[in-house]
Every structure is written in C-alpha cells, then in structure tokens.
Image (cartoon, rainbow, N blue to C red):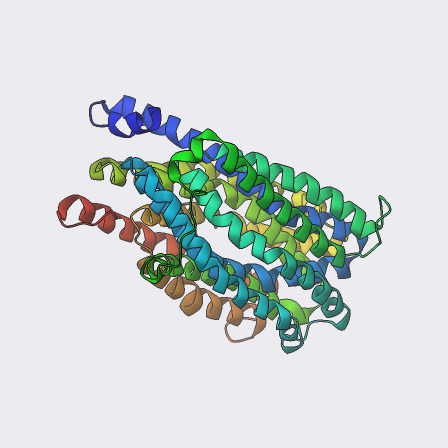
Amino acid sequence: MKEHDDIRTLETVNSSKKISLELKVFAGLAIPIYFSQLATHATGVIAALMTGNYSTVDQAAVATGNMLFWPVFFGLGGSLFIITAFVAQFYGAKRTSEIGPLLKQAFWLCLPLIILVSIYLSFADRLLEFFQSPEEVRVIAKSYLNGLLIGTPALFLFQPLKSFSEGITRPIPITYINIGMVIQNALLNYGFIFGNFGLPEMGGAGCGISFAISSWSALLVLIIYIYFSKHYQEANLFKEFVKPDFNRIFEIFKLGFPIGACIFVEFGLFSGSGLLLSNLGEATIASHSIAMQVTTVTFMLPLSVGLAAAVRTGNLLGAGNFKHARYSSFFAICVAVSLAIFNFFILFRYGSNLASFFNSDPKIISLSGSLLLVAAFMQISDGISFTGQGALRGYKDTLAPLFIMIIAFWLFALPLGYSIGLTNFFIPAQGAFGMWIGLCSGVIIASILVLFRLNKTTKNAINNKNFKVF
C-alpha cells in the first residue's frame, strides 16, 4: 500500500525531499485531525455562545458542568488514547489482522471506565456545594450533568474506533462524522435552549440533552461506516466474539492510564482553577470559561500536530525506522511552533474581540481579554509540550510525561496561581488574572521538560538494540 511505501521512502531521500515528504505526511494526517478536534470542541463553543445569549447564569452553569466532567472523562478515557499507537505500529509493520483483537480488548476496558464516570456524574453536583458555587448555577449545572451522563458511554466506545481509523492513516472519516455531530448538536442546542422547533425551552440544561443525542448518533454512524468500508476489513473487527484477555487489557491500561492522568493533570488544573475562582461570582466564572473556550480552539492546532506525530512515529517504529522516527518527532515540534506563533498573534491582538462574541457584558469582555493576553504567551510552550507528548505516545513512553505534568502544574503552577490570584501572599490578590499567570508558568516548565524527555527517548530507541516496539 502507498502508506507503507511512504514509511520506507525516507531511507533513500535527501534532506530537502525528506522535509517535503514529512510536510506532505503531516498535512495528510494533521489537517483532518485538526478539523475533527475542532468539530469536537465546537460543541462546547456553541453551547457557550448560545447560553451566553440566553443568560449569564446558564452560561456559567454549563461552564461549571464542563469543568466537572471533562477532566474526569479525559483522565479515565485518555487511557484509550494509547490504542492509536498500538494500531499505528501494527499498521506500519503490516500486521493489520492483529488490530481487531486489540480493539475488542479496548472495548472490554471501556466497561469499567464507563461505570466509574457514571457513578462520579451521579454525585458530581455535590462538589459545587463544596466550592460554594451560586445556588442558581448549581441547579442548572446538575441538569446539564444528567445529559452528559447519558452520552458518556457513547464517548468511550467512540474512542477505540477513532484510534483505529486514525492509526491506519484514515482520519478523514472521523472528521466528517464529527462535523455532522456538531451540526446536529448546534440545531438541538438552538431548539432546547431557546425552545425552538417545537422543543421545550430548557436553557443551559438543554445542552446536556443535545450532547447525549449527538454523541450516540456519532457512534452509530462510525460503527456503520467501519462495518461496510473495505479499508477496515483486514482488521477482523466484526468476525468473532472475543472474551476478555485480562493480560492484554492490563497492558493497554498500564500504558494508557498515564496518558489519561497526564491530560487530567492539565485539564484538571484549568478546570480546578475555575472552580476555585467560582466564589468570586458569575462574571468571573463566565470570563474564565470564555478564555478556556477560545484558547482551546487555538490549542487545537498544536494538539492536532501532536496526534499526527503519535501516528507518524508509531508507523515508523513499526516499520523499524528508528532514526526517522526521531527526525519526524522533532519535525512535528517545528511545525507546531510555527502554528503557535500564529496563535500568539491572534490572541495578543484580538483577544478582547474574540471574547465579545461570547458575552456582551463589558466587564466580562474586559476580564476575558486580559486572560487571553496571558494565554497568548502559553501558545509556543503548549505547542512544544503537547506535540512532544504526542510523539512520545508513539514510542509508548507515557509515564514520564505524567510526572512532568504533575511537577509543572500541580507542584508549581497551581500553588503560584492560587497565591497570586486568591491571596495577598506576594501581592494583592489579582483574581482570575493572577491564576492564569500561574497556569502560564506551568505550561512553560512542562514544555522544557518534555523536550528533554523526547530527546532522551528517541536517542534511546536508536542506540538500544533491545528497544521494544510491540
């Protein structure tokens, strides 16, 4: 197949052709992944936009619900992200028939993860009392979380199939499905929030119902597509029932859990900081949420390159091209940094303008704009950090990035952000602005440590004859 030929082409080409080939490969992977990730996040952006035009209380409630849900989902569901590396290596080694049995074990792993998150969501609203969120925010957030509870199983089951498609270098179908999900979600939000199309007017709570319907729809469409498409048949996914293989399941979880935990550390930091700020009022919650929504959109560029790097390095390692896997890893970082410079300019110059789309309150626009100014200085570091982590994922090096994130974010960024934002320990409390300064410092530290780790891991793969791929 052409993809396998491309993996081995790097052995004989010169430097300029190598750059051209890498650009072509990353464009083919990263662009569809980018639009897929953007479409996935667009559901949250649309909810923030629509609830912001409905009421600030509903906007704050949905934002608070997201702060409770997404870190936990990614913390556990992120364990399944390692499937991309497995699939990519099998595909690079032309061992496609082993992909199906792997995915079936991943589905068995989904079951306890779904149960754990469902139990958490059943009681998550009680955390809002602990963080002293306003009563009207808590009521709406609880209803919103009930909708997320219904959609959670679909999200978990979707991930192994998504990893399957991306790992065999077919990210475009996922992009189309996610775009369709966004369109459906937007229409449902418009109906359930405002009471259009004959649907009940539910405000922010309606976003949860929209999420559940669109999540299950996306899963169903992906299953049908994979079942009938010829490109997936060699994987033997639907041929026979497979019992749980606890050794294989443990192997997936052992390598995947640090990925999920790593995502939880950063997502949890941003969401946790929002919860810490929640007692400062609805305007602060909304401003923090808006800044997170905007920066997540800009973050999708380097994140997509990182996800593409996981696939690319996995393919190359599976084919035994260790030197070129190292080259591709650092090439991906160069691409991510280039895109991050563009993001920096956008946030630095137009942060307040972007915030105005989410809320018309001048106070909220001003505070959101100041947070986005700080976020502009995170962009390059974020690009290095997450692209480096993506490349390390291709090597199945997942534990070290977790320790890096814990050190950078929880041992440094959060204490610093809390001290500057909510105490008078160093200077008079700066509120959300001070908290974001702490977050920015954590991202910078993480990027430096990830870069050192990637250099060590890629060299080790080349020099160590006992380096294990499978």
Comparing 376 with 201, the one in front is: 201
Residue farthest bottom in this picture: 130
| Residue plotted at (53% across, 62% down) | 114
Q: Position of residue 95 (x, y in %)?
A: 29, 38
Classify residue 87 by image quadrant.
top left
Q: Position of residue 27 (x, y in %)?
A: 43, 30
Q: Position of residue 26 (x, y in %)?
A: 40, 32
Q: Is residue 450 left or right of residue 345?
A: left
| Residue plotted at (39% across, 59% down) | 244
Q: Is residue 186 left or right of residue 103?
A: right
Is residue 434 visible to us here?
no
Comparing 238 with 106, the one in front is: 238
- Please determine whether, in this image, residue 212 is positioned above or below residue 36: below
- Quadrant where the N terminus is found in the figure: top left
Q: Is residue 382 left or right of residue 122?
A: left
Q: Is residue 292 left or right of residue 168?
A: right
Comparing 75 with 231, the one in front is: 231
User: Number of numbered discs present?
Assistant: 0
Is residue 278 visible to us here?
yes
| Residue plotted at (21% across, 39% down) | 322
Residue farthest front in this picture: 240
Residue farthest right in this picture: 198
Comparing 434 with 9, the one in front is: 9
